Amino acid sequence: MEREAQSRVMAGRVCIVTGPTSGVGAEIARGLAARGATVVLACRNPEKGAALRETLTREKGNTDLSVAPLDLASLASIREFARRFEQDHERLHVLVNNAGIFLRHRELSPDGFEMQLMVNALAPFYLTNLLRGPLLAGAPSRVVNVASTAQRGGRVDFDDLQKARAYSGFRAYTDSKFALVLLSYEQARRWQGTGISVNALHPGRIRTNLGKGEYPPGAGLFKLLFFRSPERGAETPLYVATSPELNETTGKYYSGKRAVPSDPGTYDEAVARRLWDESAKLVGLAT
């Protein structure tokens, strides 16, 4: 992967990576920096972002890296990030919605949304829509949504989207990733012909900080022994974000650098349209 990265095929292209300070996100940012891209590190902790920027500049010799604060649990933070990005950049070529969370116990975002639904589905949906202008200006451009194989078996309960009746951390995570894939496909359909592609993917079972402190004792050792490294996990996101052969590919789900079927329920267009409309209503987005 490193030899391919050195070709600097992304020089002059502006990319955003959410959740870039650890795990797969850091490796995605590293791969884009090595390819010569202008990378905006969108992170909740700007100090960690600054440390990563220094590391990547030193490692890859790329000085076109910047840090921007973004808390995906907050609608106001997402709006402010999008506003500042448009002030600084006319075009956006790649948006990697990588950040995600897992919580065993139900929590609410500052805006009152179940936290996994908010961060894993509503936030990338909202951010992507707010950045439609720069993505159009940068077309051909790409939206890359990092989902999970956990989307299999997911569902959308329109009567209890916020999991207020009964909460299971794993069910909430599965349903949020299922929702992300549904919204990805719907966005691809709605933006067909604009020059903006929208694809989702599963990076593999990766050793990351996702759910840190939420798993039972011994889970860390299990992940160390049987899960892939973050560097391996970044291979598919980087492929979907940069591969020339995907220039006109949209509305697909990738795993292992190839298009594969997602859960059958994610292809239900009626459910996708309803979820789009409900999500837009929740975040206050005009449709």
Image: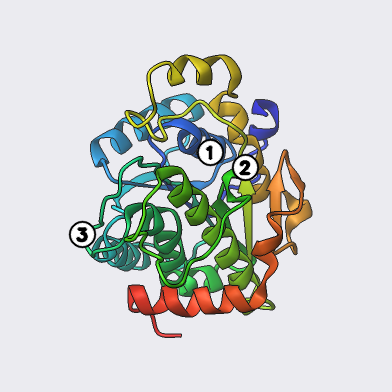
Dot 2 and dot 1 residues touching (CB under 8 Å):
yes
Give the label, 3 or 2, closer to the camera: 3
The answer to which image quadrant residue 219 occupies is: top left
The answer to which image quadrant residue 252 occupies is: bottom right
Which residue bears the numbered disc 1?
A: 28
What secondary structure is found at the residue carrying circle 3? loop
Name which residue type carries label 1. Ile
Residues under labels 3 and 2: Cα distance?
A: 32 Å
Q: Which sits in the foreground, 27 or 121?
A: 121
Q: Residues within 10 Å of mark 1 (few under 14, many from 20)?
A: many
**Which callout, 3 or 1, points at the residue further toward the start of the chain?**
1
Which residue bears the numbered disc 2?
A: 238
**Which callout, 3 or 2, points at the residue further toward the start of the chain?**
3
Q: Residues within 10 Å of mark 3 (few under 14, many from 20)?
A: few
What secondary structure is found at the residue carrying circle 2? helix
Name which residue type carries label 3. Pro
Q: Which sits in the foreground, 65 or 178?
A: 178
Which residue bears the numbered disc 3?
A: 110
Residue drawn at point x = 53 percent, y = 79 percent: 274
Q: Residue at the left extreme?
A: 110
